[in-house]
Image (cartoon, grey):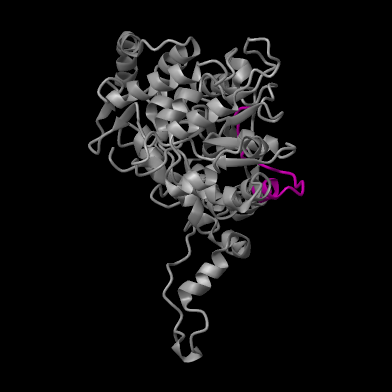
């Protein structure tokens, strides 16, 4: 598919236009706007008529009385993303309260009881609850947010309604993530979907953090300047990591007591560099054909081998186990000024609000300086939206789903983006600018999401975690299982 799916996150910028304007003085946009308008020009040169504007975006659904019906969303608990839909309590937190207002507005608009989400446990528990309910013919749930790759593998088994056929649903509206939905539905039906309700897509977007104190002490170039000039490359990144590494205790061994160039998860770090080079392992052509690029694109192997060989050099990357490298675990190399860089998701970055040292937020580096655009990884594990075939009132499901996405686009996502990320996480105005760049650079890869088990984990995590660069051999041995999984998704 030639049209880049990275545009999915640029929808957020439109949604937050009002909020952005309120902060224009901070970000310098107020001065730019005055300059563009010709500040100081004679009053008579001002336009006499207001410029034409596009009509406001709404869900186009009239207030409808559904008679006080109960409405339940099935979801699962997770430590890596926002996964709850029904927020029924105000806390004073801007994001929480935006979600609360959304729930209340929908309940009033449709005269329904928007009940607390049903959360039986982690993703496997939610999947079991869902399949048991549908197989029994029960209508326990109206919507279900399921682990994306599991839901993807269930699309041929008759569990889900076609959301395109639901009354009130308009998947071409800007608050639906159309590019992603087109990529993940292999037929003309939309059985699984993403829209603005699912801020988990943003939560699972990766960023690279740098420790400002370490950077200053080492006298290194400012990564912000490198990013904005287009010179932020893998070569620069590796050079900085080499400068930062230090055998702090002088024992000749690289242990937890030393200082490293970068920390990051075994099951995500190499994938970031592939996305940063805008390489996709699995893609779709405009005619819907699924294309496996693992062997057809030689750059994938070149990047993976180089990244693996370099990061496994002593002191470049703290290597131990997958768990200890995960960003939400207890290892605190970055927080404790013992790693110059750290791989994080937006969600996990929020946990660093209390970090003492200043840090900056940037995208992972381009592979070469002549690469036109940066690339950003969306991690596997997000929750896809589904509608069970046993839902008792499809019209109600369609109405609530459409309005959920609309209100999320209008109210929740600006709160998430502008307040939670820009104000609470970013330490400076330049980091805020970086967030805009990052969210417009997403390189959505089916091999890192829907086919995560066969590609992301089955190939790259397996190889990188064991310092193995026998790429072609591993891909070849996995290709039969991968193709079988793709064929199943295509209904073949």
Position of 316 relative to 20 (above/below): above
Position of 338 relative to 42 (above/below): above
Q: Residue furthest bottom?
A: 44
Instruction: Please identify the dominant SS of the magenta region.
Output: loop
> 92 or 350: nearer the eye?
350
Residue 70 lies, in percent from the top left, at 63, 40
Q: Residue furthest right?
A: 91
Q: Residue at x 25, y 35 (%)?
A: 285
Q: Residue at x 57, y 34 (%)?
A: 345
Q: Is residue 373 left or right of residue 60?
A: left
Residue 466 lies, in percent from the top left, at 48, 9
**Was residue 52 drawn as part of the magenta stretch in this picture?**
no
Q: Is residue 242 left or right of residue 158?
A: right
> 123 or 13: nearer the eye?
13
Instruction: Specify whether residue 133 is in view.
Output: yes
Q: Which part of the image, by quadrant, shows the C terminus?
A: top left
Q: Residue furthest left?
A: 287
Q: Residue at x 31, y 43 (%)?
A: 3
User: Residue 125 appears in which quarter of the rendering?
Assistant: top right
Span highlighted in magenta in the image: 75-100
């Amino acid at each position: 598919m030639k049209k880049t799916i990275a545009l999915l996150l640029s929808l957020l910028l439109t949604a937050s236009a009002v909020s952005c304007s309120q902060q224009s003085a901070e970000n310098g946009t107020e001065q730019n706007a005055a300059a563009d308008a010709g500040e100081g020009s004679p009053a008579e040169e001002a336009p006499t008529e207001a410029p034409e504007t596009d009509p406001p975006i709404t869900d186009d659904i009239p207030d409808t009385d559904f008679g006080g019906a109960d409405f339940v969303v099935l979801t699962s608990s997770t430590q890596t993303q926002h996964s709850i839909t029904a927020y029924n309590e105000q806390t004073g937190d801007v994001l929480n309260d935006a979600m609360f207002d959304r729930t209340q507005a929908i309940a009033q608009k449709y005269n329904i009881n928007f009940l607390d989400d049903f959360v039986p446990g982690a993703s496997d528990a939610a999947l079991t609850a869902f399949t048991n309910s549908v197989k029994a013919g029960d209508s326990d749930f109206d919507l279900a947010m399921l682990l994306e790759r599991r839901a993807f593998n269930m699309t041929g088994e008759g569990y889900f309604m076609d959301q395109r056929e639901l009354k009130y649903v308009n998947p071409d509206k800007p608050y639906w993530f159309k590019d992603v939905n087109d990529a993940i539905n292999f037929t003309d039906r939309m059985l699984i979907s993403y829209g603005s309700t699912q801020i988990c897509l943003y939560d699972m977007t990766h960023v690279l953090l740098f420790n400002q104190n370490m950077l200053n002490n080492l006298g290194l170039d400012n990564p912000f300047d490198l990013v904005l000039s287009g010179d932020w490359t893998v070569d620069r990144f590796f050079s900085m990591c080499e400068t930062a590494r230090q055998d702090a205790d002088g024992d000749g061994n690289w242990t937890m007591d030393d200082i490293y160039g970068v920390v990051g998860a075994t099951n995500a770090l190499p994938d970031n560099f592939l996305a940063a080079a805008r390489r996709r392992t699995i893609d779709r052509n405009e005619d819907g054909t699924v294309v496996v690029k693992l062997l057809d694109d030689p750059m994938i192997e070149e990047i993976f081998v180089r990244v693996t060989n370099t990061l496994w050099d002593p002191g470049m990357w703290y290597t131990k186990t997958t768990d200890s490298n995960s960003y939400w675990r207890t290892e605190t190399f970055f927080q404790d000024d013992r790693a110059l860089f750290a791989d994080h998701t937006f969600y996990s970055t929020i946990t660093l609000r209390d970090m003492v040292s200043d840090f900056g937020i940037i995208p992972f580096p381009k592979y070469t300086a002549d690469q036109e655009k940066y690339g950003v990884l969306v991690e596997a594990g997000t929750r896809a939206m589904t509608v069970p075939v046993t839902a008792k009132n499809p019209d109600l499901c369609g109405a609530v789903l459409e309005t959920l996405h609309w209100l999320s686009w209008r109210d929740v996502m600006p709160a998430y983006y502008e307040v939670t990320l820009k104000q609470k996480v970013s330490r400076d105005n330049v980091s805020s600018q970086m967030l805009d760049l990052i969210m417009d650079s997403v390189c959505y890869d089916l091999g890192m999401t829907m086919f995560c088990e066969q590609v992301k984990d089955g190939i790259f995590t397996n190889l990188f975690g064991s310092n193995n660069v026998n790429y072609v051999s591993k891909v070849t041995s996995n290709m039969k299982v991968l193709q079988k999984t793709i064929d199943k998704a295509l209904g073949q």
